[in-house]
Image (spheres, grey):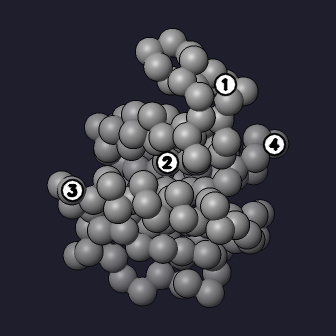
Amino acid sequence: MRAAYSGAWGYPLENEYKFTILIADRNPNVREFLKREMVAEGYRVRLAKDSREVLKWVFSQAPLDLLILDPDLPDGEEVALFKQINDRIPQLPVVIHSFKTDYSDYPESLITTVFVEKQGNSIEYLKKVISETLNYA
Protein backbone atom coordinates (compact mmCIF):
# COMPACT_ATOMS: atom_id res chain seq x y z
CA MET A 1 0.00 0.00 0.00
CA ARG A 2 1.38 3.40 -0.92
CA ALA A 3 1.62 6.26 1.51
CA ALA A 4 -0.27 9.48 0.87
CA TYR A 5 1.80 11.95 -1.14
CA SER A 6 1.43 15.15 0.77
CA GLY A 7 5.08 15.99 1.41
CA ALA A 8 7.48 18.07 -0.64
CA TRP A 9 8.11 16.86 -4.18
CA GLY A 10 5.23 14.43 -3.85
CA TYR A 11 7.02 12.23 -1.30
CA PRO A 12 5.31 11.06 1.89
CA LEU A 13 5.77 13.03 5.08
CA GLU A 14 8.09 11.38 7.63
CA ASN A 15 5.21 10.03 9.74
CA GLU A 16 3.38 8.59 6.70
CA TYR A 17 5.95 5.89 5.89
CA LYS A 18 4.80 2.34 6.44
CA PHE A 19 8.15 0.47 6.56
CA THR A 20 11.84 1.29 6.92
CA ILE A 21 14.30 -0.20 4.43
CA LEU A 22 18.08 -0.16 4.68
CA ILE A 23 19.81 -0.11 1.29
CA ALA A 24 23.44 -1.26 1.33
CA ASP A 25 25.47 -0.99 -1.86
CA ARG A 26 29.00 0.18 -2.55
CA ASN A 27 27.87 2.14 -5.63
CA PRO A 28 26.45 5.58 -4.69
CA ASN A 29 24.46 5.75 -7.94
CA VAL A 30 22.73 2.44 -7.17
CA ARG A 31 22.03 3.55 -3.59
CA GLU A 32 20.47 6.83 -4.72
CA PHE A 33 18.45 5.18 -7.51
CA LEU A 34 17.05 2.55 -5.16
CA LYS A 35 16.36 5.20 -2.52
CA ARG A 36 14.39 7.32 -5.00
CA GLU A 37 12.37 4.30 -6.17
CA MET A 38 11.64 3.04 -2.65
CA VAL A 39 10.67 6.48 -1.30
CA ALA A 40 8.30 6.86 -4.25
CA GLU A 41 6.71 3.56 -3.14
CA GLY A 42 6.14 4.99 0.34
CA TYR A 43 9.07 3.48 2.25
CA ARG A 44 11.39 5.26 4.67
CA VAL A 45 14.95 4.61 3.46
CA ARG A 46 18.29 4.47 5.21
CA LEU A 47 21.55 4.10 3.25
CA ALA A 48 24.81 2.27 3.91
CA LYS A 49 27.91 2.28 1.72
CA ASP A 50 29.85 -0.39 3.60
CA SER A 51 29.56 -3.14 6.22
CA ARG A 52 30.39 -0.74 9.03
CA GLU A 53 27.37 1.43 8.16
CA VAL A 54 25.13 -1.64 7.80
CA LEU A 55 26.07 -2.71 11.31
CA LYS A 56 25.60 0.85 12.61
CA TRP A 57 21.97 0.74 11.43
CA VAL A 58 21.41 -2.86 12.54
CA PHE A 59 22.65 -2.05 16.05
CA SER A 60 20.89 1.33 16.30
CA GLN A 61 17.59 1.81 18.08
CA ALA A 62 15.84 2.76 14.82
CA PRO A 63 13.78 -0.24 13.70
CA LEU A 64 14.43 -1.80 10.31
CA ASP A 65 11.83 -3.79 8.40
CA LEU A 66 13.95 -4.98 5.46
CA LEU A 67 17.53 -4.86 4.17
CA ILE A 68 18.42 -4.62 0.47
CA LEU A 69 22.02 -5.79 0.35
CA ASP A 70 24.67 -6.15 -2.30
CA PRO A 71 27.11 -8.27 -0.28
CA ASP A 72 30.05 -6.99 -2.33
CA LEU A 73 30.74 -4.24 0.20
CA PRO A 74 34.27 -2.82 0.36
CA ASP A 75 35.09 -3.51 4.01
CA GLY A 76 33.45 -6.72 5.03
CA GLU A 77 33.38 -10.47 4.88
CA GLU A 78 29.93 -11.53 3.72
CA VAL A 79 29.34 -14.54 5.98
CA ALA A 80 30.50 -12.64 9.08
CA LEU A 81 28.20 -9.74 8.18
CA PHE A 82 25.22 -12.09 7.75
CA LYS A 83 25.97 -13.69 11.12
CA GLN A 84 26.10 -10.33 12.89
CA ILE A 85 22.82 -9.25 11.27
CA ASN A 86 21.19 -12.54 12.23
CA ASP A 87 22.49 -12.33 15.80
CA ARG A 88 20.98 -8.85 16.24
CA ILE A 89 17.73 -9.09 14.20
CA PRO A 90 17.10 -12.74 13.28
CA GLN A 91 13.70 -11.99 11.75
CA LEU A 92 14.99 -9.19 9.46
CA PRO A 93 14.18 -10.05 5.82
CA VAL A 94 17.16 -9.55 3.52
CA VAL A 95 16.95 -9.10 -0.24
CA ILE A 96 20.28 -9.90 -1.88
CA HIS A 97 20.52 -7.50 -4.83
CA SER A 98 23.58 -8.52 -6.78
CA PHE A 99 24.86 -9.67 -10.14
CA LYS A 100 24.34 -13.38 -10.64
CA THR A 101 28.06 -13.83 -11.33
CA ASP A 102 28.78 -12.35 -7.86
CA TYR A 103 26.20 -14.52 -6.15
CA SER A 104 27.29 -17.68 -4.43
CA ASP A 105 25.55 -19.86 -1.92
CA TYR A 106 25.13 -17.49 0.97
CA PRO A 107 24.19 -19.11 4.26
CA GLU A 108 20.42 -18.99 3.86
CA SER A 109 20.00 -20.68 7.21
CA LEU A 110 21.40 -17.56 8.91
CA ILE A 111 18.86 -15.04 7.61
CA THR A 112 15.68 -14.75 5.62
CA THR A 113 16.92 -14.05 2.12
CA VAL A 114 15.58 -13.54 -1.36
CA PHE A 115 17.88 -13.08 -4.36
CA VAL A 116 17.08 -10.44 -7.02
CA GLU A 117 19.61 -10.21 -9.82
CA LYS A 118 20.85 -6.73 -10.73
CA GLN A 119 19.82 -6.00 -14.31
CA GLY A 120 18.69 -2.95 -16.22
CA ASN A 121 15.02 -3.86 -15.77
CA SER A 122 15.06 -5.49 -12.33
CA ILE A 123 13.58 -2.54 -10.39
CA GLU A 124 9.95 -3.57 -10.92
CA TYR A 125 10.70 -7.13 -9.82
CA LEU A 126 12.63 -5.80 -6.82
CA LYS A 127 9.66 -3.60 -5.83
CA LYS A 128 7.33 -6.60 -6.12
CA VAL A 129 9.58 -8.80 -3.97
CA ILE A 130 9.87 -6.07 -1.32
CA SER A 131 6.12 -5.45 -1.23
CA GLU A 132 5.32 -9.15 -0.97
CA THR A 133 7.98 -9.69 1.69
CA LEU A 134 6.87 -6.79 3.88
CA ASN A 135 3.17 -7.50 3.53
CA TYR A 136 3.74 -11.16 4.35
CA ALA A 137 5.85 -10.52 7.47
Hey, what amino acid is under mark 3?
Asn
Q: Give whichever of discs 2 and 3 has the lower sequence position.
A: 2
> Residue sitting at 55 percent across and 84 percent down?
108
Q: Give whichever of discs 2 and 1 has the lower sequence position.
A: 1
Q: Which type of secondary structure does the marked residue at label 2 adopt?
A: strand
Tell me if residue 81 can be seen. Answer: no
**Which residue bears the numbered disc 1?**
14
Report the Cα–Cα distance between label 3 and label 1: 29 Å
- In the image, residue 65 sits, relative to residue 111, either above or below, namely above
Report the Cα–Cα distance between label 2 and label 3: 18 Å
- In the image, residue 108 sits, relative to residue 40, either above or below, namely below
Q: Residues within 10 Å of mark 1 (few under 14, many from 20)?
A: few
- In the image, residue 58 sits, relative to residue 47, either above or below, namely below
Of the numbered discs in the image, which one, if any, rests on residue 121?
3
Tell me if residue 13 can be seen. Answer: yes
Q: Position of residue 123 (x, y in %)?
A: 31, 53
Q: 107 or 129: which is nearer to us?
A: 129
Hey, what amino acid is under mark 4?
Gln
Q: 119 or 88: which is nearer to us?
A: 119
> Residue 46's image quarter?
top right
**Which residue bears the numbered disc 4?**
61
- In the image, residue 67 sits, relative to residue 42, either above or below, namely below
> Residue sitting at 29 percent across and 37 percent down?
29
Task: Name the residue at the right extreme.
Answer: 61
Report the Cα–Cα distance between label 2 and label 1: 18 Å
**Which residue bears the numbered disc 2?**
23
> Residue sitting at 54 percent across and 74 percent down?
113
Q: Position of residue 49 (x, y in %)?
A: 45, 43
Report the Cα–Cα distance between label 4 and label 3: 34 Å
Q: Give whichever of discs 1 and 4 has the lower sequence position.
A: 1
How many marks the image carries: the answer is 4
